[in-house]
Amino acid sequence: MKSKYALMASAIASLVCTPAVQAQSAVTIYGVLDTSLQTAHTGTGTTTRLDSSAVAPSRIGFQGTEDLGGGLAAVFRLENGFNLDTGGIAGNGALFNRESWVGLRGSLGQIQAGVNYSALFTTYVNYSLGELNTLGWGNATNNFVYVPSARLSNSVRYVSPSMAGVTVRAVMAFGTEGAAPRTMGDTVSLGSNYKNGAFSADLDYLQQKYAATTATTSPVYLGKYYLAAASYDFGFIKPAVLYQIHRGSPDPASAVSSTFANPDNNFYEINATIPRMAGGTLLLSFGQYRRQSSSSGNASSYGVRYDYRLSRRTGLYLGVSEIRNNSNAAFTVSNAGGPGVATTAGSNVSSFVVGMVSTF
């Protein structure tokens, strides 16, 4: 009797599960766990804290592909960022706050809709170097990047196939989707990448509408970003450079994420990774932020980080970094998944970190 019930249960499970298995080609659950101990000296004293997401944003994600036939596939990704030190959701508190999209992939490229990264963000990641993760603790770009230009809600993203080494990226976002001011946050982002052996170069453009306040009567203006980057892997060293220009009219007095306002500025990063340094990889980074309206808003970033892999999935890191702020600048040494220890305008920040990254 027992075997009869087992056989019936097996048959029912087969009928229920088989269509899903046949329809879904592959689903992957993945994640990154990053925890660190950081000490930062700022204008208000010294802070030591257990932290999350210093080098790599702590996250869990789900991605899948379904073969639709004829070279066409349905694809999706859902990715949640969280704080490993508290267990809380990171960022804006949304469940899938890092990426959330569904799309189609075929011979003409991939198109996806949801929460997407801009063409600028792809370039930041590709050229702000590191061994355990890119665009992380110690990278100058990570300290100066303006987040509303990197991750875009209510957006559609297209990536072309590589043609003679050239890949094209395009993203359009609908900002606040009619909430007042009506077109605030509307974004168009275009980028191109060229790869030839060890050489890689990118050119990107992004325009984004911003406002002074979220009041219904607040006028909407246009901010424009121009980004160029290049790298070359010599084997014994891989240098890279990024240079970004932002211009808007009128020039806002300060950066305000909720209104997408960003002061006119230029910033650049020059970095290099040196592999096989006592079994690990050394990252060197230098960059500067230049406020166009006044040099009092300028800042410089210095970073040195050593990454050591214990295995393919687990690594240790330690680093030192410094931000030198002019009188009206308040940049800090930022984590990959969020802000670092806050400072006051005109105060320098020096920071030390030691931590561990594990992936699954």
Image (tube, rainbow, N blue to C red):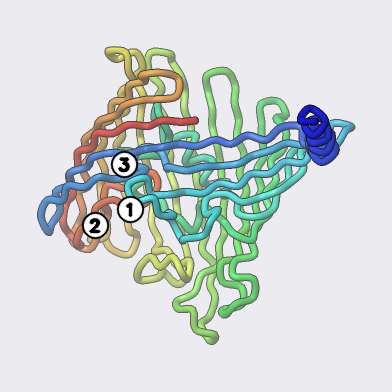
Q: Which residue is mark 3?
A: 287
Q: Is residue 160 above or below residue 266?
A: above
Q: Residue at x 49, y 84 (%)?
A: 215
Q: CA distance from mark 2 to mark 1?
A: 8 Å
Q: Which mark is residue 156?
A: none
Mark 3 or 2, nearer chain start: 3
Residue flagged by tag 2: what amino acid is it? Ala
Quarter the N terminus occupies: top right
Please state which amino acid type lies under the numbered disc 3.
Answer: Gly
Q: Can residue 149 be seen in this snapshot?
A: yes
**Of helix, strand and loop, which one carries label 1?**
loop
Residue 221 position, x and y percent, is 53, 72
Q: Dot 2 corresponds to which residue?
A: 342
**Residue at mark 3 to residue at mark 2: CA–CA distance:** 19 Å
Q: Mark 3 falls on what kind of element? A: strand
> Relative to 177, is 13 above or below?
above
Answer few, some or many: residues within 10 Å of disc 2's Cα (few below 14, many 20 plus, some between 14 and 19): some
Q: Are marks 2 and 1 in contact (CB under 8 Å)?
A: yes
Three-letter code, disc 1: Pro
Q: Which mark is residue 339?
A: 1
Q: Earlier in the sequence, mark 3 or mark 1?
A: 3
Q: Position of residue 344 (x, y in %)?
A: 19, 61
